[in-house]
Each structure stands twice: as structure tokens, then as C-alpha cells.
């Protein structure tokens, strides 16, 4: 017996991380689509859902409810979707394990990662991308400001964890790494193993990598890198790694600083080595708002 299959028709697999799986599912009674994330229930999972349940903001994926089941749903294999297959290790169920089902707002399948990919295939580094980028950055900062004001740190901001709602708004998702701002004893080693240096492009702040104590400013650092990536087409392979590492130490490409002078200034502040030198989210909100308005005025002048 499963509440999930009782109450929902599973319509697809939205994503699969190392620690869980997210399905698109239609509530049979309401005839409405939701996203349901299934994770092994443990302290960390309960923290994720505990935090998400207290947050209500237009730039944060909306939480509806959660429940526990004795097994993980495994029925749906999405055709032609690699995310739908399961590794053998995951198929072996631990009989004592419990699974947490987290029901959330269903967002579009296009994450910010896909948005960036799409933009990079379009040749024009145009004013439209610039305007869209600041609008996206503003919304993420707005969500982050709210998270920080509630005393939390997201810790895992990256394009694949940022979604678009059906209302077209940008939504911060994946609260799997969330923590209290004043929490000292933490599973930092586990955190490092999971996201730390996997792949060439980490969004983690330097102090987060070296395992020093850190605060909410790690989110500002990640956001700086995201804003840069929204605007700038990064090459692939080795070169990408070089540009990325340079960016992480505030060395943005010269052409970038010439083309995007104002953004360059803002991003460099966000990427400051010392966390205390990075602006607070609330300050950034004001800064980006001013910058967006300037751009709009320029745009209007250009079209008159
Ligand atoms: P990772 O291990 O990579 O951190 P995760 O297992 O922690 O992933 P999420 O990041 O929460 O899980 O979700 C994985 C993917 O599923 C997302 O990148 C996104 O593509 C998709 N997804 C998650 N939540 C939603 C949602 N509410 N609506 C639509 N798609 C979603
Ligand atoms: Mg994720
Ligand atoms: Mg995660």
C-alpha cells in the first residue's frame, strides 16, 4: 500500500540525484500536477523538509506536504530519459529504511542550467540576455534574502537547483543542504563528498571548501558565479576550468569586464575572498534594482 500511488498518477521523472528522485505526479482527486521528491528519511532529509515547510515566498519552490512510506517508489521508468533508470545499488532496499515523500509545486522542466545552455547556443550576446540575466539574478537574490532573513543558509545554489515556475517566476529549489545560520556542528565532510569538488565547476565559496567556519555569505558567493554564468558563454573542457577558477578568485575575463562593466563590478563584490566583504542579499537587491532600472531606461531611449 502506498499513499503515493493511491493518490497520484505518476507522469514522469523530473530528476534524479545521488540521494533522491523527483517525480511529476498528478493528484487524482484535484486533477493537478505536483512534484514529489522521494528521499531516504534521515536527519538531513527531515531538516530539508522542516525548513522548506516554513518558507513561503514567490521565489522559492512551494511546499505542500510530506509523508513517510516504507519503500521507495520504483515503478516509473521514463522512456528515453536517463533520469528514469536506477542503479543497482538503489534497487536494493534496506528493509528498515523509511522514505520521505515531499510534495511540492510542479515547476517547468527547464532549469536555469538548461536556460544557460540554450542561451549559449544562440550567437547573439545581446542586450536581451543582459536584461533577462539581471531579472533572473534579482529574483534569486530576493529568494536568498528571504532565506537569510529566516535564519537559514541554502548552501547549494547552482543553476540545476534553480527552476522556473508556471508563473514564469524564478524558484529556488533543493533545500537538501540547508542549515541554520548559527549551526556549528555540521556534517561538513559529507557535504564536501557530495558536492564539494565533484566536477570542474563548484559554486562553493572558498571558506566552504577549506572547511573553515562559514556563514550565509557562501550563498552570495555562489550567486556571483551564477550571475557571471548567466551573462558569459564559458568554453568547454580545460579552458572552462581555467576561466572558472579565475572567476572564483575575482579574475573575470577582460572582455567580460569591458562588455559588462557594471555587472563586472557587482559580481566582483559578490566573489570577494573574505565573506564579510561580500554584500548582504538585501544590499544586492537594491543594487540590482537600480541597475535593472538603468538598463530599462537605456532600452526605452534606444527604441524611441
Ligand atoms: P542533487 O543530488 O543533484 O542535489 P537532489 O537529489 O538533491 O539533486 P533536487 O535538486 O531537489 O534533488 O531535484 C533534482 C532535479 O529534479 C532538479 O535539478 C530539477 O531538475 C528537478 N526538480 C526538482 N524539484 C522540482 C520541481 N518542484 N518541479 C520541477 N522539477 C523539479
Ligand atoms: Mg539538486
Ligand atoms: Mg541536493
Image (cartoon, helix red, strand yellow):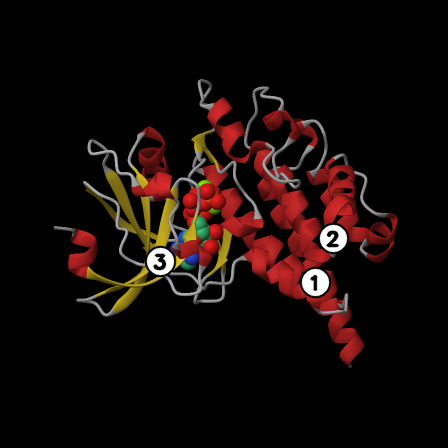
Q: Residue at x 31, y 35 (%)?
A: 46
Q: Position of residue 293 (x, y in %)?
A: 69, 62
Say which mark, if any, is on residue 104.
none
Side of 304 where 99 appears, left or right: left
Q: Is residue 58 visible?
A: no
Q: Secondary structure at mark 3?
A: strand
Quadrant (top left/top right/bottom left/bottom right) for the C terminus: bottom right
Q: Nearer the viewer, residue 88 or 1?
A: 88
48 relative to 32, above or below: above
Kindly check if marks 2 and 1 are in contact, taking CB atoms under 8 A apart as contact: yes
Q: Which residue is mark 3?
A: 105
Dot 1 beta carbon under 8 Å from ligand 1: no
Kindly check if marks 2 and 3 are in contact, taking CB atoms under 8 A apart as contact: no
Q: Position of residue 149 (x, y in %)?
A: 47, 38
Q: Residue furthest front?
A: 88
Kindly check if marks 3 and 1 are in contact, taking CB atoms under 8 A apart as contact: no
Q: Which residue is mark 1?
A: 120
Q: Residue at x 37, y 62 (%)?
A: 78
Q: Name which of mark 2 and mark 3 comes first in the sequence.
A: 3
Q: Which residue is mark 2?
A: 234
Q: Name which of mark 3 and mark 1 comes first in the sequence.
A: 3
Dot 3 beta carbon under 8 Å from ligand 1: yes
Q: Secondary structure at mark 2?
A: loop
Amino acid at each position: 500500500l502506498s499513499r503515493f500511488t493511491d493518490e497520484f498518477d505518476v507522469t514522469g521523472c523530473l530528476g534524479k540525484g545521488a540521494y533522491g528522485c523527483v517525480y511529476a505526479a498528478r493528484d487524482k482527486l484535484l486533477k493537478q500536477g505536483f512534484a514529489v521528491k522521494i528521499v531516504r528519511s534521515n536527519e538531513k532529509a527531515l531538516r530539508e523538509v522542516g525548513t522548506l515547510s516554513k518558507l513561503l515566498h514567490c521565489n522559492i519552490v512551494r511546499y505542500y506536504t510530506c509523508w513517510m512510506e516504507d519503500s521507495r517508489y520504483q515503478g516509473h521508468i521514463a522512456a528515453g530519459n536517463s533520469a528514469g533508470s536506477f542503479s543497482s545499488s538503489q534497487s536494493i532496499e534496506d528493509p528498515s529504511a523509511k522514505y520521505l515523500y515531499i510534495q511540492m509545486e510542479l515547476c517547468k522542466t527547464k532549469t536555469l542550467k538548461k536556460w544557460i545552455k540554450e542561451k549559449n547556443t544562440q550567437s547573439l550576446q545581446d542586450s536581451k540576455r543582459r536584461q533577462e540575466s539581471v531579472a533572473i539574478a534579482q529574483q534569486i537574490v530576493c529568494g536568498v534574502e528571504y532565506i537569510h532573513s529566516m535564519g537559514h543558509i541554502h548552501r547549494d545554489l547552482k543553476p540545476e537547483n534553480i527552476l522556473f515556475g508556471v508563473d514564469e517566476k524564478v524558484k529556488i529549489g533543493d533545500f537538501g543542504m540547508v542549515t541554520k545560520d548559527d549551526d556549528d556542528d555540521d556534517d561538513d565532510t559529507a557535504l564536501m563528498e557530495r558536492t564539494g569538488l565533484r566536477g570542474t565547476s563548484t559554486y562553493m565559496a572558498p571558506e566552504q571548501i577549506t572547511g573553515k567556519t562559514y556563514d550565509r555569505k557562501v550563498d552570495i558567493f555562489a550567486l556571483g558565479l551564477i550571475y557571471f554564468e548567466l551573462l558569459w558563454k564559458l568554453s568547454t573542457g580545460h579552458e572552462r576550468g581555467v576561466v572558472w577558477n579565475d572567476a572564483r578568485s575575482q579574475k573575470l575575463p577582460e572582455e567580460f569586464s569591458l562588455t559588462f562593466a557594471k555587472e563586472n563590478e557587482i559580481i566582483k563584490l559578490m566573489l570577494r575572498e573574505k565573506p564579510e566583504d561580500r554584500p548582504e542579499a538585501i544590499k544586492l537587491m537594491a543594487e540590482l534594482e537600480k541597475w535593472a532600472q538603468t538598463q530599462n531606461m537605456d532600452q526605452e531611449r534606444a527604441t524611441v
